[in-house]
Amino acid sequence: MKHLSIAATAAILAQNVAGQAMLRFACSQLVVDRVDPIVNPGMLYTPIFTRLWSTCTSCSFVEDLSNYWTAVMFFKNKEGQYQRVPQVGNGGPQGKLINNGGLDVYYIPSGKTTAFAKGFRMIAGDAGNTQDSAVDKSNICHRCWTSTNEDQFIGGAPCSGSDTVAIPKSPTCKMIRQTIIFPACWDGKNLDSVDHKTHVAYGTGGFGGASGGGNCPTSHPVKLPQVMFELMWNVTEFSDQGLWPSDGSDPFIYSMDLGGSAAHGDYVFGWKDDTLQRAMDQGCNLNHDCAGAGLHYQAPELYNACTIPQQAPEEVDGWLQGLPMGGSIVKV
């Protein structure tokens, strides 16, 4: 009965996420680069990240100039060589999103929701964490996607059911879906904090996961849109276990040379004017034009064309003799 209860709860969560009004849109890969303006501002050759911001926007909405960063996943073969795992767009109940690498971004409102203020930034997860037990699976998780079709929905709501903190290592995985859910409660005063975390908090109650953020504690009473990243890593070409490390070590790691426990995301607010607040108030949905909020969807060929050159030039594609993190950190 316990397993039936868990399955039923996951199904309810999936229906709630699919049915509620929220922004869900694609952001294409702007550049793969070893810079991290939040954790290591002004430095080059930090652990490699996918960066999604510039003076143009690589996202579906013209008005969104926010910064989105995530670590990059690599496959390690038995020879000790590395290759960056390709990314694909996501499907699911709300329809397929088209992006060139990158990720899918969600803004999920719940009740009275206050949009982020100019200059706001935060981090979800810990790039140096090595313990799966230190991570709340309802906030950061991975799912083994057993279908080669990203439109064929696998499992329940994000970070539920059999999802794991660790990166799955099974030859049955054709893709790995990574989910990063940010805190949705703010202290109402600080746009940032020393650790980029303590000015925000996760809510309590509710289902957790992608449910809008739960109830905010008195220390962080302001309800924010719940920001969620989803990334689809296509591991199909690496499913042959004959390629995997013979010592039993993990074949999939992030660019910090760590596993799923170190998965994390960076967020810097950058929406134009008050468009995000109006989008939350108007109940704008998915990646469609929303006249009441002044949101304008742009075609994939337009946002895919927004790219910038590397600030820390180096090879990041093809087979590499080591992770691209061996150079000294250089002060700009």
Image: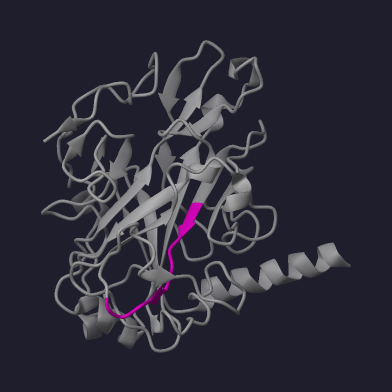
Image height check: is 289 above or below 54? below
Answer left or right for 168 relative to 47: right
Residue 181 counted in the magenta span: yes
Residue 71, x across and y down, in percent: 38, 41
Q: Does residue 125 appear in this view?
A: yes
Which residue, as the protein is rendered here, is positioned at the far right?
Answer: 1
Number of callouts: 0
Residue at the spot x=26%, y=81% of the render?
277
Q: Nearer the viewer, residue 140 or 172?
A: 140
Color style of the picture:
one colour
Residue at the spot x=65%, y=16% of the render?
247
Q: Does residue 149 appear in this view?
A: no
Residue 199, x across and y down, in percent: 35, 69
Quarter holding residue 250? top right
Image height check: is 204 above or below 77? below
Q: Nearer the viewer, residue 190 or 96?
A: 190
Q: Quadrant of the C terminus?
A: top left
Residue 213, x across and y down, in percent: 49, 75
Image height check: is 236 above or below 143? above
Residue at the spot x=22%, y=61% of the render?
298
Quarter holding residue 223? bottom left
Residue 40, x across and y down, in percent: 25, 43
Q: Quadrant of the N terminus?
A: bottom right
Residue 315 counted in the magenta span: no
Which residue, as the protein is rendered here, is positioned at the far front?
Answer: 194
Q: Which residues are magenta?
A: 179-189
Which residue, as the protein is rendered here, is positioned at the far top?
Answer: 79
Answer left or right for 131 relative to 183: right
